Image (cartoon, rainbow, N blue to C red):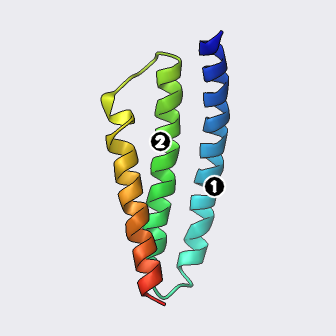
Amino acid sequence: MIGYLEGILKIANIFLSVVAGVIAVSLFQQFKKEKNPLAWRLLIVVLVLFAVQEILGALRAFEIFTTPHLTHINPTIMLALLIWTLIIMVTSK
């Protein structure tokens, strides 16, 4: 029963990752107007990596695919890129 609940929640997470992908695509229009497009590009990369992370999490929940990088490497890369993006945005003002 817990496995099914986890699977349903992962499907909801996939929906949220699709929304994150749509936001990433819409940000392409925004970063063309900004003076510092590097921060926006990094934010788009973080959103795409989030979508990939959620899809891999759903595959793991349904026992289709599993990898040890899912819980350590990918979130670390996403967090580092997000911190770098915030530093760029704060220092560019």
Q: Is residue 38 visible?
A: no
Please identify the residue farthest to the top as the structure is shown: 1
Residue 78 horizontal/vertical position (percent): 41, 53
The three-letter code of the residue at mark 2 reads Val
Q: Residue at x 52, y 45 (%)?
A: 51
The mark tally for this picture is 2
Residue at label 2? Answer: 52
The image quadrant that residue 5 belongs to is top right
Q: Is residue 21 above or below residue 52?
A: below
Spatial separation of the CA atoms under disc 2 and disc 1: 13 Å
- Say few, some or many: other residues with alpha carbon within 10 Å of mark 2 (under 14 / 14 to 19 / 20 or more): some
Q: Is residue 62 left or right of residue 14?
A: left
Q: Which residue is mark 1?
A: 22
The reply to whether discs 2 and 1 touch (Cβ–Cβ < 8 Å) is no
Q: Is residue 49 above or below residue 6?
A: below
Q: Position of residue 53 (x, y in %)?
A: 47, 40
The location of residue 62, given as percent across then percent down, is: 53, 17
Residue nearest the observer in this picture, 5 or 26: 5
**For residue 55, side relative to residue 9 (left or right):** left
Residue shown at the point (46%, 32%) measured from the top left: 56
